[in-house]
């Protein structure tokens, strides 16, 4: 894990341990908390048009709220990976590699079909 990621993982780990929160940080509880934080992130954008979001991001206020919620999501996700015993950054790299095989550019470019919808298309 690159140094910055490891430093952050350790800081989040220590933060929980110092507060005796590891008793609450089960995979289920962390996944549920993560879902709540994603919901808070979505709430910042809900009911706004793309144009309203673009304009609000320029003012900085919305950007700061999104930044805070995205940080919460990252922290819970990093903690979940730590508790489950896997390297989150490594898992993301593995997933990108898998997705690059599932979504070859010549089939996936410019469309939103799921990889299993490419069956029967030319894979060459």
Image (tube, grey):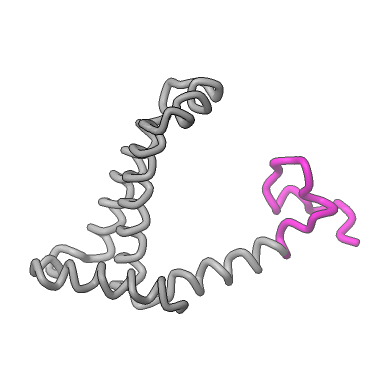
Give the residue drawn at x 67%, y 47%: 114
Q: Position of residue 96 (x, y in %)?
A: 62, 64
Instruction: Tell me: residue 59, above or below residue 25.
Output: above
Q: Residue at x 37, y 57 (%)?
A: 74
Provide residue 64's location: percent of width, then percent of height.
36, 39
Image check: 48 left or right of 120?
A: left
The residue range painted magenta reads 101-124
Q: Left or right of 123: which side holds 94?
A: left
Q: Is residue 109 left or right of residue 36?
A: right
Image quadrant in which the N terminus is located: bottom left
Q: Residue 68, located in which quarter of the rendered image? A: top left
Q: Nearer the viewer, residue 62 or 26?
A: 62
Residue 106: say if magenta. yes
Q: Is 75 in front, or is 99?
A: 75
Total labels: the figure holds 0
Residue at x 28%, y 75% (from the top left corner): 10
Residue at image location 40% in from the left, 33% down from the top: 60
Please check the rendered image and state whether residue 31 is part of the magenta-colored stretch, yes or no: no
Going by the picture, which residue comes out furthest to the front? 59
Taking 27 as reference, is 67 left or right? right
Q: Position of residue 82 (x, y in %)?
A: 32, 73
Could you say where residue 3 lies in the image, as x and y percent from the top left? 42, 78
């Amino acid at each position: 894990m690159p140094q910055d990621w490891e430093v952050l993982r350790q800081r989040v780990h220590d933060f929980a341990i110092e507060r005796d929160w590891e008793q609450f940080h089960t995979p289920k509880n962390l996944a549920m908390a993560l879902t709540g934080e994603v919901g808070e992130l979505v709430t910042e954008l809900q009911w706004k048009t793309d144009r309203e979001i673009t304009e609000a991001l320029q003012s900085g206020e919305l950007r700061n709220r999104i930044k805070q919620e995205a940080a919460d999501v990252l922290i819970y996700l990093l903690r979940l990976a730590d508790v489950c015993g896997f390297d989150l950054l490594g898992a993301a790299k593995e997933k990108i590699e898998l997705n690059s095989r599932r979504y070859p550019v010549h089939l996936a470019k410019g469309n939103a079909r799921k990889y299993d919808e490419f069956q029967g298309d030319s894979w060459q």
